[in-house]
Image (cartoon, grey):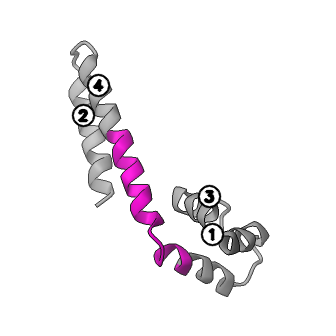
Amino acid sequence: MRNGHMTLPVLLEMRNNPTFKEKVVTLNRQSDTADFEWCINQIRNSDVIQQSLDISQKYLDKATSLLDTLPKSDITPHFKKLIKRLQNRMH
């Protein structure tokens, strides 16, 4: 968050929590560490991380399904390996 990246958990929490959203929109690189820590704790204490993992899994499943509809080629196993790596990164 300090670098300005808005991750999916941050976006989901902003949508669900108006107080969190108000805090996030005021953050900048010079904001107090305590403000960032408050935001991180809000995310950790909500279900948005699990929601983000579920959304990621949905898209990985979709990628796998679409890959299976394409003509087989030498590159297909590489795409499947990439999808598997992304799934493993989530756990």
Give the spatial CA distance, label 2 vs label 3.
28 Å
Q: Quadrant of residue 73?
A: top left
Give the spatial CA distance, label 3 vs label 1.
15 Å
Residue 17's label in the rendered image is 1
Question: In the image, is residue 63 above or below residue 36?
Answer: above
> Under tag 2, what secondary structure?
helix
Region in magenta: 41-60
Q: Nearer the viewer, residue 12 or 64?
A: 12
**Three-letter code, disc 1:** Asn
Q: Main secondary structure of the magenta part?
A: helix
**Mark 1 nearby-residue class (10 Å; few <14, some 14–19, many ≥20):** few
Q: Please report the residue visible at 75 percent of the width from the left and 71 percent of the height from the top.
A: 22
- Kindly check if marks 4 and 2 are in contact, taking CB atoms under 8 A apart as contact: yes
Q: Could you tell me residue 36's position as x and y percent?
A: 64, 78
Q: Is residue 56 magenta?
A: yes
Residue tagged by mark 3?
A: 6
Residue tagged by mark 2?
A: 80
**Three-letter code, disc 4:** Leu
Q: Could you tell me residue 88's position as x and y percent?
A: 26, 54
**Three-letter code, disc 2:** Lys
Residue tagged by mark 4?
A: 67
Number of the front mark, 2 or 3: 3
> Under tag 4, what secondary structure?
helix
Number of the front mark, 1 or 2: 1
- Kindly check if marks 4 and 3 are in contact, taking CB atoms under 8 A apart as contact: no
